[in-house]
């Protein structure tokens, strides 16, 4: 497909952007042979978001169990309902999640949930990128052969779908299995999706059991490397941050979920940034965030860091936007996250006439601090249009069937 976006605003200047295949072919050089010409005179072009920590299927649990203490929330509500989860639940939950992400400008997400092949199928059908994680829980020894088959199955969904290994956390996965995951990851060059130091209790329990804090212990067993995405990463001390930087492991900030679940600490952004740790942004699942909008996640991230540091200059809008786009792309090894010639054609066109972007002194500031989801007009992923003028093909059916599936799941 060739598509030309004419007279679109890019970094404060009007230009044209040509898409050929799945790449941005040129900027500022108009061509007449395009299959489609889009009038961008009232639009701005910006890279789409990369959500580096999600549990997509949990969109069916949005509002299911809010405002409970963390352990009660998990033990009384979330774990019991998850014990009844089916492939159909995951498929329709993931379809709903993909719809929400497209509507809010996200074209790629790293996921961790049961039946990852259903998440892969939903993402493929929706036209966006996904990194579905093969989840590991418990002490039963991982069968490397079985994992290899799962990786092969997930890889069969096409170029936009890339498998990950997803050991849940150090308190739910045995040391032996974490070592096995690290070995498979190295051998197959697979990224790893992991929950790290979300709560203070995690840290205390780790010190009690292993005599070391989580990051130090993970380094000792050879788990940490540049392929590991550490979601949450809240309760870290300075030594652990240095270890993360040395290992080149990534840290994923999930501010809304951490605030809502009252984890008691704040992602140490300034220290991680100073140490050179690569940072990305994630929403977590809808059971603990209620939203998959990276627009609102950027605002929460920036405001939380300013408040925690008592410094208005911390995580300025430009930085928050970069973390949500280019930062996520780098963390997942994608050639995306910026509007440049040769980059993957993953981007959004935003409506400059939308109330939340008016009067328009700074587009990036508006996207981070004031934008409503309705400002996203059109979304491209891999060179294809997945949303046009705020409408996604088949969205009414997705909403209807997802709602019915959610009621079925939680009613079992």
Image (spheres, rainbow, N blue to C red):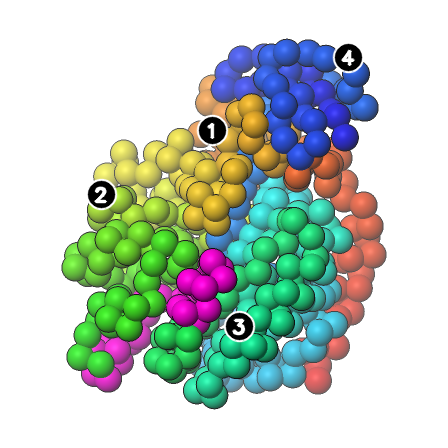
Q: Counting residues from the N terminus, which is met first, the one under dot 4 or under dot 2? A: 4
Closest to the observer, 315 or 21 = 21
| Foreground label between 4 and 1 | 4
Q: Counting residues from the N terminus, which is met first, the one under dot 1 or under dot 3? A: 3
Instruction: Indicate whether 253 appears above or below 179.
Output: above
At which x and y percent is residue 394?
Answer: 82, 50
Q: Badge 1, how many Cα within 10 Å: few under 14, some, many 20+?
A: many
Measure how far apart labels 2 and 3 are at the Cα level.
Answer: 32 Å
In which quadrant of the rendered view does residue 104 lie? top right
Picture quarter with the C terminus: bottom right
Picture quarter with the N terminus: top right
How many marks are shown on the rendered structure? 4
Residue 32, disc: 4
At which x and y percent is residue 13?
Answer: 53, 13
Measure how far apart labels 4 and 1 are at the Cα level.
Answer: 31 Å
Which residue in the protein does label 3 denote?
Answer: 135
Q: Secondary structure at mark 4?
A: loop
Q: Badge 2, how many Cα within 10 Å: few under 14, some, many 20+?
A: few
Instruction: Indicate whether 128 appears above or below 364.
Output: below
Which residue in the protein does label 1 denote?
Answer: 364
Question: In this orientation, does residue 128 appear?
Answer: yes
Closest to the observer, 402 or 271 = 271
Instruction: Indicate whether 257 appears above or below 359.
Output: below
At which x and y percent is residue 399?
Answer: 76, 58
Which residue in the protein does label 2 denote?
Answer: 274
Closest to the observer, 290 or 210 = 210
Q: Secondary structure at mark 1?
A: helix
Q: Are marks 4 and 2 in contact (CB under 8 Å)?
A: no
**Image: magenta residue range:** 181-209
Residue at point 78% right, 50% down?
395
């Amino acid at each position: 497909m060739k598509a030309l976006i004419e007279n679109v605003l890019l970094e404060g200047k009007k230009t044209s952007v040509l898409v050929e295949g799945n790449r941005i072919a040129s900027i500022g050089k108009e061509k007449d042979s395009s299959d489609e010409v889009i009038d961008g005179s009232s639009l701005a072009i910006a890279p789409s978001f990369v959500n580096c920590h999600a549990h997509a299927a949990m969109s069916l649990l949005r509002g299911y169990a809010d405002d409970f203490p963390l352990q009660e929330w998990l033990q009384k509500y979330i774990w019991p309902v998850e014990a009844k989860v089916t492939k159909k639940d995951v498929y329709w939950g993931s379809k709903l999640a993909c719809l929400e992400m497209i509507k809010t400008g996200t074209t790629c997400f790293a996921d961790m949930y049961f039946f990852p092949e259903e998440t892969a199928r939903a993402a493929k059908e929706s036209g966006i990128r996904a990194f579905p994680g093969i989840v590991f829980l418990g002490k039963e020894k991982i069968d490397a052969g079985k994992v290899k088959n799962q990786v092969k199955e997930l890889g069969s969904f096409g170029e936009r779908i890339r498998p990950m290994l997803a050991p849940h956390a150090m308190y739910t996965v045995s040391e032996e299995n974490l070592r096995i995951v690290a070995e498979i990851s190295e051998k197959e060059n697979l990224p790893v999706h992991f929950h790290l130091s979300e709560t203070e209790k995690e840290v205390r329990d780790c010190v009690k059991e292993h005599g070391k804090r989580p990051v130090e212990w993970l380094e000792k067993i050879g788990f940490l490397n540049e392929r590991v995405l550490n979601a949450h990463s809240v309760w870290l001390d300075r030594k652990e941050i240095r270890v993360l930087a040395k290992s080149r492991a990534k840290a994923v900030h999930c501010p809304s979920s951490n605030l809502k679940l009252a984890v008691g600490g704040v992602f140490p952004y300034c220290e991680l940034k100073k140490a050179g740790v690569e940072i990305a942004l994630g929403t977590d699942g809808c059971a603990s965030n209620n939203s998959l909008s990276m627009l609102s996640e950027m605002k929460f991230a920036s405001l939380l860091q300013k408040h925690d540091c008592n410094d208005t200059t911390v995580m300025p809008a430009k930085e928050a936007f970069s973390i949500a786009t280019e930062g996520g792309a780098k963390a997942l090894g994608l050639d995306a996250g910026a509007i440049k010639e040769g980059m993957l054609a993953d981007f959004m066109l935003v409506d400059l006439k939308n109330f939340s972007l008016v009067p328009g002194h700074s587009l990036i500031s508006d996207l981070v601090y004031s934008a409503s989801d309705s400002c996203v007009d059109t979304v491209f992923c891999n060179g294809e249009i997945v949303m046009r003028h705020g409408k996604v093909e088949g969205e009414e059916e997705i909403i209807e069937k997802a709602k019915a599936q959610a009621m079925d799941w939680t009613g079992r």
